[in-house]
Image (cartoon, grey):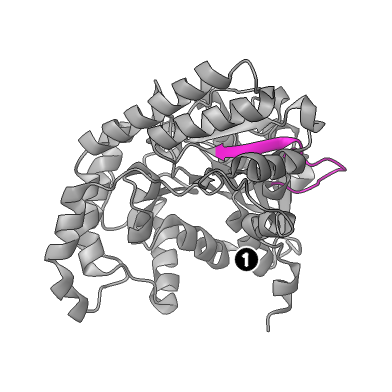
């Protein structure tokens, strides 16, 4: 076995299972799951219809590069959503089986151990999506964690990263909007990182899977920032998108990577050997999903309603910060639980049968500090009705 497997951390939900293994849920309540970021809104019926109507295509092998019609649809969506002049569907777009597998495999493909750099580094926010770290470890690269704290609006203090780290960096992960903090990048933030990429020749990979779940203003994407700077070739910049959150289709396993065509063509060759090609029926369903914005707007309306409910009903009892985008609350654990994230999520389970996620499990200690400790991630994925019930239970728990 690969010895690097021993360096992988248990997944956050495995840690939660260990924390709660000797606990019992509140017996008088039904379970409400707010721990995992799995959308519970209904998927678009018309997408499911397309999937059902094309099951006969399962008798055919899909190509690794995907159907031209899907790549073209994605290119048009990117152009419209991010104000891009032209995205080449043949070289700058690649459909993938969900962003998770693509993020992992992309790291394996781009980390290079040749040359003078004997410690290739992958920079990432902290807290973070655990795939960033795991992929770096298995590619034998060194993760470097950038803390996301109130002092930097939970985006990450990239300006504080030492120059010697940037000289070793081959890949920078940005999560925009951030999971779990919900903060988004500004044009100034993007310009700073793009200039750093030019100076030190590293790739910027922007995980934008939550980009369509916003309250007021759509987040600025990395490719949008590139275009604003006159970089229509998206040099050293790639983005990951998915239908999981945007369209409530996590089980479809459909997403894409787009950006620098030179990088994507080499990555396509890697994927050809890896054997990850999206089934044709999924591609046809994906075309239908990317071509429609009405269901996405309705999705945003439901999340807005739930965020407003939580802010109105629990704002005076919990330290709630309205995120810029996404569907997570990143909550400071209450003082009555000693600001302890593990104690708070355990109490939510035992007293209210509500699942949440301890923030320390999404972070790593770096320089003696874990920026997730003391925070709890709550995913507003349940229905509006379940959200009302969760709020009622938490109010009772905090006020009794």
| Up-down relation of residue 29 to residue 302 (above or below) | below
Q: Nearer the viewer, residue 25 or 166?
A: 25
Is 370 covered by the magenta stretch?
A: yes
Q: Secondary structure at mark 1?
A: loop
Relative to residue 265, is residue 348 drawn left or right?
right
Relative to residue 283, is residue 260 drawn left or right?
right
As drawn, the residue found furthest toward the right would be: 368
As drawn, the residue found furthest toward the bottom would be: 1
The residue pinned by badge 1 equals: 112
Q: In this orientation, does residue 126 appear?
A: no
- Looking at the rendered image, the quarter that the N terminus falls into is bottom right
Report x, y in % for residue 19.
Answer: 73, 54
For the point 26% across and 48% down, the residue is 74
Q: Which residues are magenta?
A: 363-378
Relative to residue 193, is residue 87 drawn left or right?
left
Q: In this orientation, does residue 391 appear?
A: yes
Report x, y in % for residue 117.
Answer: 73, 61
For the point 56% across and 42% down, the residue is 174
Mark 1 crowdedness (10 Å alpha carbons): few <14, some 14-19, many ≥20: some
Q: Nearer the viewer, residue 366 or 227?
A: 366
| Up-down relation of residue 242 to residue 279 (above or below) | above
Q: Quadrant of residue 107?
A: bottom right
- Looking at the rendered image, the quarter that the C terminus falls into is top right
Most prominent secondary structure in the magenta stretch?
loop
Is 218 covered by the magenta stretch?
A: no
| Up-down relation of residue 38 to residue 185 (above or below) | below
């Amino acid at each position: 076995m690969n010895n690097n497997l021993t360096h992988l951390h248990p997944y956050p939900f495995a840690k939660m299972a260990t924390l709660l293994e000797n606990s019992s849920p509140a017996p008088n309540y039904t379970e409400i799951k707010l721990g995992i970021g799995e959308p519970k809104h209904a998927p678009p019926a018309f997408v499911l219809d397309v999937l059902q109507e094309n099951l006969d295509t399962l008798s055919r092998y899909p190509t690794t590069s995907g159907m031209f019609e899907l790549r073209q649809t994605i290119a048009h969506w990117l152009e419209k959503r991010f104000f891009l002049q032209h995205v080449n569907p043949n070289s700058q777009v690649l459909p993938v089986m969900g962003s998770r597998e693509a993020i992992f495999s992309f790291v394996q493909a781009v980390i290079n151990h040749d040359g003078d750099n004997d410690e290739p580094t992958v920079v990432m926010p902290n807290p973070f999506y655990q795939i960033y770290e795991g992929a770096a470890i298995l590619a034998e690269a060194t993760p470097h964690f950038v803390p996301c704290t109130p002092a930097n609006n939970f985006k990450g203090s990239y300006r504080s990263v030492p120059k010697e780290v940037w000289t070793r960096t081959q890949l920078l992960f940005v999560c925009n909007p951030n999971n779990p903090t919900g903060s988004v990048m500004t044009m100034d933030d993007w310009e700073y990182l793009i200039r750093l990429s030019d100076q030190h020749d590293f790739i910027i990979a922007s995980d934008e899977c939550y980009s369509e779940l916003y309250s007021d203003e759509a987040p600025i994407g990395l490719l949008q920032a590139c275009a604003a700077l006159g970089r229509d070739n998206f040099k050293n910049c790639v983005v990951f998108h998915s239908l999981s959150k945007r369209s409530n289709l996590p089980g479809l396993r459909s997403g894409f990577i787009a950006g620098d065509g030179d990088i994507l063509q080499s990555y396509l060759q890697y994927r050809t050997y890896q054997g990850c090609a999206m089934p044709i029926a999924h591609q046809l369903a994906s075309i239908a999903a990317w071509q429609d914005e009405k269901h996405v707007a309705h999705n945003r309306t439901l999340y807005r309603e739930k965020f407003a409910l939580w802010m109105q009903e629990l704002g005076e009892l919990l330290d709630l910060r309205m995120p810029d985008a996404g569907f997570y609350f990143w909550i400071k654990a209450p003082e009555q639980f000693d600001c302890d994230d593990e104690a708070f999520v355990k109490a939510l389970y035992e007293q209210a049968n509500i699942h949440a996620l301890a923030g320390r499990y999404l972070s790593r200690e770096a320089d003696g500090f874990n920026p997730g400790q003391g925070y709890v991630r709550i995913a507003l994925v349940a229905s509006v009705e379940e959200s009302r019930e969760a709020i009622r239970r938490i109010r009772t728990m905090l006020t009794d």
